[in-house]
Amino acid sequence: MNLDEIEKDLLKRVADISGVPEGAYNFRINGKSVGKKSTKNIDVKSKAEESGIDVFIEPGTKKDVVHIPVILSESGHKETVYNDFYIGDNSEVTIVAGCGIYNCGVKNSIHDGIHAFHVGKNCKVKYIEKHYGTGPSAGKILNPTTELHLDESSYVKLELEQIAGVDSTSRLTKADLKNDAKIEIEEKLLTHGRQIAKSNIEVTLEGENSTADIVSRSVARDTSKQNFKLHITGKTTCRGHSECDAIIMDDAKVIATPSLDAESLNAELIHEAAIGKIAGEQLTKLMTLGLTPDQAESKIINGFLK
Amino acid sequence: MDKSFHGSGYKTERDALELKNISFLIINGERNRHVLDNISFKFKPGELIVLTGPNGSGKSTLAEIIVGIKSPKSGQILLGGEDITSKNITERAKLGISYSFQQPICFKGVTVRDLLEIARPENQAFKELEIVGLEKDEYLDREVNKTLSGGELKRIEIATVLARNSKVMIFDEPEAGIDIWSFDNLIKVFKKLRQKNKDKIIIIISHQKPIMDIADRVIILKKGSL
C-alpha cells in the first residue's frame, strides 16, 4: 500500500495508525479499496452492487479490531459508501473508522459514509469514528449516517469525533435497543472559521431495562454554526440520559435541542443542555497558575473535548 | 491586633510584598463605596499572616488586588522592591504570587492531574494531594467538577497553591467546607509550611482561632481599613 505523506498524516489522525494494522481492515482511498484483509473470525467483503463493504464477525469473536479508514486526497472526489456490520452473538470487537479529507482544489470533496450495525446478543462493541479535514481549500464535506440495532444484553460505545478542518457536516446517528441492551454515545465536535455542523442523534429504547447515555460536547469558534438535536424515546421500563454542552466563542452560533419522548410510565428519561462562553473564573484560575490567557483558553477547550 | 514578630528565618526585607496606599471603589450609580481605603502594609518573608475581619470588609478584594484579578483605584504593589501594579495575573504568578480561591473553580474535562501539572510542570510526585489528605490513586484522574464534594474541591484548590511553592502564597478561607479532621490536618500543613519556608510569605484569610493561633501577625480589616 503506497501512501504519500499527506495520506499518511490523515491516516494517523483519523485512525491512529502508521501503516497496515493487525487484524482485519479495509483501506479506502479516493474511492478505491487499496487494501483489504479478512481474518479467521472477521470476513471483509466488497459489496457487489454498490460502493462499500460488508463485515461479518463470527459469534464469540474476542478482542479483535477492525480498521476501515477512508482518505480523500483528490479534490472534487464525491462518494457515498455503504458499510454494513453483522456482529455475531457474544463478540467483543473494536471498529475503527474515520475519514480524512485533504483539499487543495476548487471543487468540493465529499464523503457520505452510511454505516449499519447489526449487533448480536451479549456483544461488546466499541466504534471509534474520527473526522478531520486539511488543505488550503474549503469544500471538505463529511456526512456520516450511523444506524445501530442492538439485540438483547448487547453493549455499544460510540466515540464520534470531528477534530478540525471539516467545512460542512451533517451527522445522523440512530439506534434501537432490545431488552437489557445499553448504548453510550460520546460526541466531540470543534468548528471554526465559517464551518457548519449538524448532528442529529435519535435513540429508541424498545426493550425492557435498556439504557442510553449520550454526551455531546462541542466548541464553536469564529463564525461557525452548530445545530444539535438529541432525541430519546422510551417505550418501556428503560433509562435514558442526554447531555449537550457547548462552548461558544467569538461570533459563533449554537443551537441545542434535546427532546424526550416517554411512551411508558416506567421510562426514566433525562436531558441536559448548556451553551456558554468559557467561564471567566476558569481562565483566571489557570492564569494564577502561570498560564497566559491564550494558553488557559487552549487548556480549557482541549480538556472539554478530551 | 499585631502580634510581635519573631521572624527567626527572615533576615532581609528584599523580598517583601508591600502595599502602598491601596484604594478600591465600587461604583454604584452616583454612590461610590470604598471597599479598601488607603491601605498600606508590608508582608515580610518568613511570616505567616492572618487577615481577618467581618464579612464584606474587603479581605478577598485585597487578595485579588495582590494577585492581579482586580485593579486598585490608586496605590502601588511592590514585590521585592519592584512595582508590579501594572502586571497582569500571569506575570504576577510567574513572579511568585499564588492564590487559593475562596470558591474552588470547577472545570469540565480538566483533571486534578492537569491542574497540578500546570501548577508545577515538573511535578511527578503529586505529593501535595497527600499533604492535603487526598489519595493520589483515587483523585489524580478525576475531573475537577461537582462530582467532588465541596471539601474535596477545596483541598484540591489548596494543593494547587502548595504545588506552585511560590514566594507569596495566599489562601482565602481555606477552612470553608472542610470537615473538622481535614481542618486539623490543614493547621499542621500551614504550621509546617511556615517552619520549612523562611523565605516565603504566607497570607491566610480566615476567621478561625486555630489559624490565628499559628500566625506571626493577625491583621484586622474593617470597613476597608486596617
Image (cartoon, helix red, strand yellow):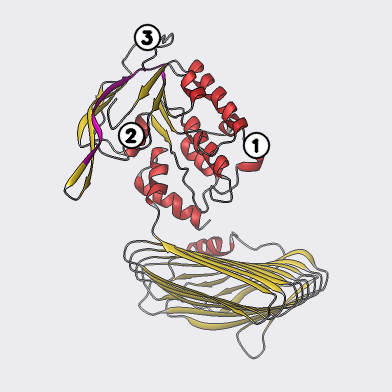
Q: Position of residue A29 (x, y in %)?
A: 55, 74
The residue singled out by tag 1 in the image is B135
Residue extent of the magenta highlight: B33-48
Query: Where the N terminus of chain A falls, by quadrant?
Result: bottom right
Q: Do the residues under discs 1 and 2 have CB atoms within 8 angstroms?
A: no
Secondary element under disc 3, as helix, strand or loop, is: loop
Instruction: Establish whether labels 1 and 2 are both on one chain.
Output: yes
Which label sits in the foreground, 1 or 2?
A: 2
The residue singled out by tag 2 in the image is B57
The residue singled out by tag 3 in the image is B11
* Real-space Cα separation, disc 3 to disc 1, in angstroms: 37 Å
**Residue A34 part of the magenta-drawn span:** no
Q: Pointer 2 indicates a residue of which chain?
A: B
Q: How many marks?
A: 3
Which of the 4 image quarters holds residue B87? top left
- Outermost right residue: A60
Sooner in the amino-acid sequence: mark 1 or mark 2: 2
Res. B101 in view: yes
Circle 2: is it few (<14), some (14-19), or many (20+) Cα within 10 Å? many
Circle 1: is it few (<14), some (14-19), or many (20+) Cα within 10 Å? few
Q: Looking at numbered disc 2 in the image, what kind of residue is underneath it?
A: Ser
Q: Pointer 1 indicates a residue of which chain?
A: B
Q: Do the residues under discs 2 and 3 have CB atoms within 8 angstroms?
A: no
Q: Looking at numbered disc 1 in the image, what kind of residue is underneath it?
A: Glu
- A17 vs A265: above or below: above
**Residue B45 part of the magenta-drawn span:** yes
Q: Do the residues under discs 3 and 1 have CB atoms within 8 angstroms?
A: no
* Real-space Cα separation, disc 2 to disc 3, in angstroms: 32 Å
Q: Position of residue A67 (x, y in %)?
A: 65, 68
